[in-house]
Amino acid sequence: MTNQAFETPDLTLALPEIWLLAMACVVLVVDLFSNDRDHGPAYWLTQLTLVGGIVLTVSTQWGVDASTFSGTYVADSLGAVLKVGILVLAFLGFAYSRDYLRDRGLLKGEYYMLGLFAVLGMMVTVSAGNLLSLYLGVELMSLSLYALVAMDRDSTRASEAAMKYFVLGALASGMLLYGMSMLYGVTGSLDLAEITVAAAELDDRRFLFLFGLVFMMVGVAFKFGAVPFHMWVPDVYHGAPTPVTLVIATASKVAAVGLFLRLIGEGLLPLLESWQHMVVLLAVLSLLVGNTVALVQTNIKRMLAYSTFNHVGFILMGFVAGTPEGYGASVFYALTYAFTVAATFGLVLLLARKGFEGDHIEDFKGLNDRSPLFAFVMLILMVSLTGIPGTVGFYAKWMVLKSVVEAGFVWLAILAVIGAVIGAFYYLRLVRYCYFDKPVGDGPQLTGSGGFRAVLAANGLLVLVAGIFPGTLVAICMAVFL
Amino acid sequence: MLESSWPLLSLLIWMPILGGVLVLLLGDGQRALGRLVALAVSLATFLFSLLLITGFEAGAAAMQFVELRPWVEALGVNYHLGVDGISMPLVVLTTFSTVLVMIAGWNRIAYKPSLYMACFLIMEGIVVGVFSALDAILFYVFWEAVLVPMFLIIGIWGGQNRIYATIKFFLYTFVGSVLMLVALIYLQFQAGSFGILDMYGLNLPLSTQVWLFIAFLLAFAIKVPMWPVHTWLPDAHVQAPTGGSVILAAIMLKIGGYGFIRFSLPVVPEASLELDWLMILLSLVAVVYIGLVAMMQEDMKKLIAYSSIAHMGFVTLGFFIVFQVVLNAGESGAILALGGGMVQMISHGFISAAMFLCVGVLYDRMHTRMINEYGGVAHRMPVFTALFVLFAMANAGLPGTSGFVGEFMVILAAFQANFWYAFFAGLTLILGAAYTLWMVKRVMYGPVSNEKVGALKDVDGREKLVLGILAVAVLWLGLYPAPLIEIMEPSLENLLQHVMASTNLN
């Protein structure tokens, strides 16, 4: 270590993050000098940044396997896939949020800047090759999200949510950091590749190492919102402004997959036997609690919060096997689930108008009479979340089930499919309101500009298209781990 | 396997689905055009499906019209289609029934007719997919996807209690099928392929087979439905619109029966042998007990729904007595049993469709399905009464109608298995006659019971057409079933030999 010569890091490998960082600052400055009350320049620059980020990620990182900044930053296909997912989801989030925020006086330049920093944090997390950069990414993401949740400062519900999110989140970060310190203490290294090597040849220090592993698992489970570290999820989903909920529910889940894979899935793969049962336990609890409690929710944001646990359970199940197929299934699951949920929140935002959140399940009554197109989108989304074939949600569930059956956990697969049946009940309830009920009063009214509607419709219909032709996306997710 | 020169089966699957999307896009603004397109698509699909019959190589047991191309390469899933003598008649039954539903619903649907037509067209394509899929995952995709249009049909156009009925329908069938998914994944893991035919060659240990059999049983038994998981069916039928009931009875129930003969018997033959007593018991309970339940119904649709369960009991009975028949009387008797089950499926497709359409005709005029609100309909609707009595006779299994053929074959085979099987199965001839003809007597005959009945008008041209076509079908299959049996026989023999070889019974 001491005689290591100073090397200039290869900046081109980290171009997506550098671009995002630079553009976030530009957005901040441009917004400061723009007089547009709708913050148009900031919005368009932000979307441009995200699109640019996608292009840069694909062109510089897909198919590459390299590291830079002394191994703290890894550029590989896994990172590229997750980053493209995060960027697309953020793009959707920003596209759906404008009218909602304007109606509530929340449309500020800081929203875009904080959003971009949260995205940057997620990208750093999924590209981390070192405990420090991993933690840096997680914290950058979390701090930006805390601030975003609290953005509606006059709402007591949002303030409560932000407070809860912050206190519990800080606790979880502390756990994560504490676990990391144990690892450092045992191996003397912060580099994940070196830790992997050390983990394979543990002897008498095994106990301390596992001690650290448990703490890290707690931190990761919190970021996922896996039961029993889930208490923050419903309140934050419910309290946060819907566009922020969208980001937390989608992009941050993808980032959490990256966090798990980098830190535990790949970093500590030699200790699979030790963490496998922890993951099984988290998955089982998530499946049970999520489904049963979601049954009685009447607020769609809370319902989605509880049903998230069910899906987190599935994502965790993919990790259980510790095989490339399983990891690929989890990545596929997380990406498609996030994409589907993004559209669901988009529909909530479509119904929301000044003084009306549109987040109560009964607000969707008679949507088919008002807009057959968006009722159909809702149908596709709910069918996909249930896991019915013809939509992409089926392949996600099936790939995960396949990986656990092949790992010998048939009982876990049976438990999961029974959970899916329970899930069908509360997802179908939304379809029922959209299709079988007549509008009450003036019923659901669609707001939103043409562009918003076009993106939302495309988002929903893509869930169907990807369900009929899943081949490419499956191949990409599988190729990452080969 | 016989490759097809052009993708006929794909056409039968995707033409109605895309046609349904087109009808949906036309919207309710162009009502007349929309239903014309819907009818044209369903008719064209039916006519194309006739090419299956003309192009079918009788005497061949192998899959025909095979299409095979990779679909999800990374996971080894293929777009693999093909039909044999077992599935081909069911495909034609599907396309045939959909045309009837289109005509029957022609001007009866006031609320969102384009969505109604589109649902039926899309469902048609999906069901054809179920019957022709040769890849387990492709099969499962179609199998599950069929729930969604049916869910909407019952939920949107159903009766008073439609939401309860449709959610019950969905959840019941979903519970059964998710366990089948786990079973299929496990089988793929063992066979190294999702090809259904590849799964036939597995020689799994008996204990594994039993678990797989139970998973399949749950999926298929709920769909058929068998006692005691039948309770969703009366609810769904009573609430569904006429077209929904027709498709439900004529086609959806057949998917369950088809599953037994395509999966349970050949994939887990030893477990089928081990548990055949259970299947026979459940089938006989369906025939006898559900027959008695049917007799007590006050609601015509409910009565027909229960009679459907009883009749489907013959299908499962025919399929699962084969082991005992082979032991006692050799393979020819077993072919009789399997063939009887298959003929019963087709025949029930005609008869139940006709019965539900008849109730629909009455319901459209009187807006009630209660038997005691009718009486003396024959005085006002003579043509309708003639047709209704014919279908009722067929439902009761009168010789000369299609209802007789399948039941007779199964009962005949059952004698070779065990006298008591045949005895209890034979009770259906009494029970079926009792509940059907008693209903006919109360609804059709006697003096005109009230003013509403007095004001009834006889069937119009459209209704005559639909019921007339079905009457021809019922009589044709009743008088001359030989062509159908010829188509099925080689495939059934092939299946039987495979099953008997795997269970060492021959």
Image (cartoon, coloured by chain):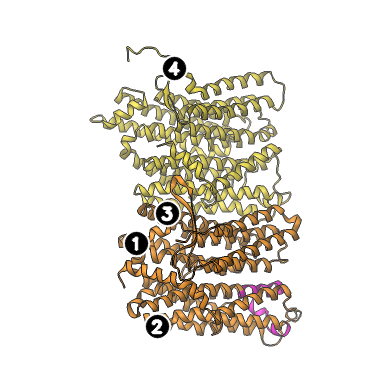
Chain colours: A yellow, B orange
Label 1 or label 2, whichever comes before in sequence order: 1
Disc 1 designates what residue? B209
Q: Residues within 10 Å of mark 1 (few under 14, many from 20)?
A: many
Q: Amino acid at mark 1?
A: Gln
Q: Quadrant of residue B275?
A: bottom left
Q: Mark 3 Cα within 10 Å, few/some/many (few <14, many 20+)? A: many
Precedes in sequence: disc 2 or disc 3: 3
Identified by mark 2, the residue type is Phe
Q: Which mark is residue A9?
A: 4
| Secondary-structure class at tag 3 | loop
| Residue A119 lies within the magenta run | no
If you read the primary sequence from the N terminus, does the residue marked by circle 3 or circle 1 appear first?
A: 3
The chief SS type of the magenta part is helix
The quarter of the rendered structure image containing the N terminus of chain B is bottom left
A78 shown above or below B472: above
The reply to whether dot 2 and dot 3 touch (C-beta < 8 Å) is: no
- Residue type, label 4: Pro
Local SS, label 2 = helix
Q: Amino acid at mark 3?
A: Phe
Q: Determine which of the numbered discs, if any, sits on residue B194 in the image.
A: 3
Look at 65% across and 27% down and name the residue there.
Answer: A44
How far across and how far down the image is residue A425, in percent? 53, 54
Among the 4 quarters of the image, the one containing residue A6: top left
Q: Are marks 3 and 1 in contact (CB under 8 Å)?
A: no
Residue B394, image x, y percentages: 57, 81
Of helix, strand and loop, which one carries label 4? loop
